[in-house]
Each structure stands twice: as structure tokens, then as C-alpha cells.
Amino acid sequence: MMMQHDEDDAPADPLPDPWVGAVDLGPLVMTLGFALRRAQAAVAQDFAKSFGPEEIRPSQFAVLTVLRHNPGLRQTQVSFALGIKRTNFVPLIDELERRGLAERRRVPGDRRAAALFLTREGAGVLDRLEAIAREHEARFAARVGVEQHAALLGLLSRISDRGFDAE
Amino acid sequence: MMMQHDEDDAPADPLPDPWVGAVDLGPLVMTLGFALRRAQAAVAQDFAKSFGPEEIRPSQFAVLTVLRHNPGLRQTQVSFALGIKRTNFVPLIDELERRGLAERRRVPGDRRAAALFLTREGAGVLDRLEAIAREHEARFAARVGVEQHAALLGLLSRISDRGFDAE
DNA sequence: TATTGTTATACTCTATAACTATA
DNA sequence: TATAGTTATAGAGTATAACAATA
């Protein structure tokens, strides 16, 4: 995830020559799908570099955040809120529980359900993660300007508005 | 990819009750990573619905588009331009070639290299795909407004600016 | 020695079907 | 019958290592 050391290590220099900008992407550049892909790649890369030593992936950070703000939610509610199918959510919460950051508790009224909580350790770790997340976010706000950053968030939410489906 | 028919088919109605908007996402909503994830999900869903019958994935459409605008490019150049590792690009171009939409030609000067071209059939298919893509894009432009759509593209490109890495 | 395309492989994300134990 | 959580599984996307042919 950082520091490669394989045979492809060489390309540390900018790039060959007739490369950068030489390829015409055509109508692709006016396309939301392609623009979103590249932006997400850039953000994901910065995320990986920022959180690298913490061994936390975006989805895990998102779950911990939701648990802090909504202690006691059912598994399905959390997974739905994050756009993760409940079936894929199982191993995710499994690992957070295994690492002692979150826990499942049985619900009195319904013996099928599992209520999710942050552990004390999870809360401590999340404090640290949030500090990293703020710096991570600030880097992009600085890159485009604070107002533009806010505008971007607003536009993105309008794109995804009427767009929940996962599960 | 459309019309589910498994046991989870029931939830056709809006949603239970204390669900929508009931979950507090906390600082997540001010986060580029999360906003990009949701927007990309919405766009990918519309893409799948629009191109469904054509059996074309975003990456395949992107390759065909690049080949139309840059006939004769080397494999590695195309893959780099699209942010796809050359190693993962192989099966992608393999399938396009198998379907008769693109072709590899040997390069006179360099017997290692492969130059990529759209076939005549590929050009015909791409004409049809581009029409679908324009409608697909127009739906989102209509959703946020044409000017906002353009602004969004501009902001996204600034996010990904200094951000090429794939390979 | 370096580069082009390739194979093999692994890990994450996502998606569907079907099971269990409850309700 | 329906729901909550679960298992098994398959498909994309993405990542690294290493190889053959050629430069």
C-alpha cells in the first residue's frame, strides 16, 4: 500500500515523453462517470496514505462514525444508511468486533436483531481517526478552495439525491 | 442488473418507517470520499440501466472512445491514459477484440508493441453507444442544471488534477 | 538493462441465492 | 409469511510479482 519495490519501480521520473496530455480522451472529459472515477481515485489515494498506519478502510471508518452518532442502531439500519448490502456488512462488522472497536449486543424486544455500539477503545481510536480525516479533507478543501469544496459537496449530493438502492 | 426477483424482492415500498433520514451520518456528510461514493453509485446505476442491453461496461466504453480519437496508440498508452494498469488492461482489450470491436496490430518499428484500433464494427457500435451516453449524461445535467453540471465537472477535474498514479 | 505485453495470483467490493431463528 | 442476520459464492476492479520476447 506504500513503497513499491517490484520491477516497475523505475518509473519514478515524470513519464516517458509524448505521454502526458498526449492522449485525446474525447467526449470522456465531459462525462460525470469518468470525472467521478478519477476524483475518487485521487481521494482514495490520499485516504490510503493518510490512514495507512491505522489499518482502516473507508467503509470501516464510515461504520465507526455512524455508530458514534447513532449508538444502538440495528445492523441493517447501519448498512442501509451507508449503502452497503446487509450481506456484505457482516464481515465488515465482524472485523471491527474482532479488533475490539465495535460490538454487537442482543436487543431485549427482538431476539433476532443485533444492536451496534462503539466500544470504549473504538471511541478512542475514532478520535484519532477523525483528526486524520479532518486533515485529509482539508487538503482537498485547500486544493480547490473552501467555498468550492462546499459547492462540490452540494453538487455531489444533488447527483446522488434520489439515488439510494444498495439493498 | 435490473429487476430483482429473489427473496428480497418485497421491499418495493418506500421503506419501513423510522428509516429514511433517521440515521445521522455525522461528519461523513462533509466528506468528499463519501459524497463521491454515493454520486458514483448513482451514476453507475444509471449507466447500467442505460447501457444494459448493450453489454458494455464503463471501462470498455472508455477504451473504445479513446481508440476512436487516438487510432494506433500502444496498449500501455491507452491503459495509462485511462488509469488502468497495463496488466489489468490485457483481459479488457482481449474481450473487445474477441467481440470484434477492437483489434491489435503489430507495429513495424517495434515487434514487442501492439497498436490498437477500432474495427469497422466497433465504430458502428460506438456510434450507438455514444448516443446512449449523451442521454445518460443529459439526465444528470438536467438533474442539477446545465451550468451546475459544467461546474461540477470542473471541480472534479481540480480534485483529480495532480493525481495520476495507476501504473 | 529496460520495456512491452503477458500470466498467475490475491484481495477488496459488490451482487444473488438460500439458510436459521426468530417474529 | 415476513424479517434480521448469516453463509456461500461469483463477478468485477485493482494490486504485485515474475516471465518471454524484444529493444
Image (cartoon, coloured by chain):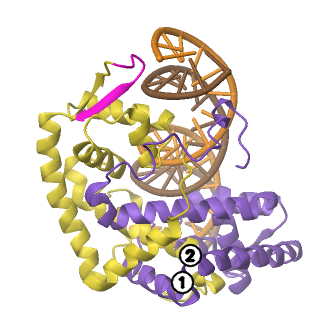
Chain colours: A yellow, B purple, C orange, D brown
Identify the residue at horizontal 56%, vertical 84% (top origin): B145
The disc placed on residue A124 is none
* Contact, mark 2 vs mark 1 (Cβ under 8 Å): yes
Horizontal and vertical percent position of residue A133: 22, 61
**Amino acid under label 2?**
Leu
Identify the residue at horizontal 35%, vertical 19% (top origin): A109
Say whether residue B67 is magenta: no
Which corner quadrant holds the C terminus of chain A? top right
- Local crowd size for mark 1, using a 10 Å CA cut-off: few (<14), some (14–19), many (≥20): many
- Which residue has dot 2 on it? A32
- Which residue has dot 1 on it? B149
**Amino acid under label 1?**
His
Residue C9 horizontal side relative to residue B111, left or right = left
**Which chain is home to disc 1?**
B
Q: Which residues are magenta?
A: A109-117
Distance of mark 2 from mark 1, alpha carbons? 8 Å
The kind of secondary structure element at disc 1 is helix
Nearer to the camera, C12 or B134: B134
**Which chain is home to disc 2?**
A
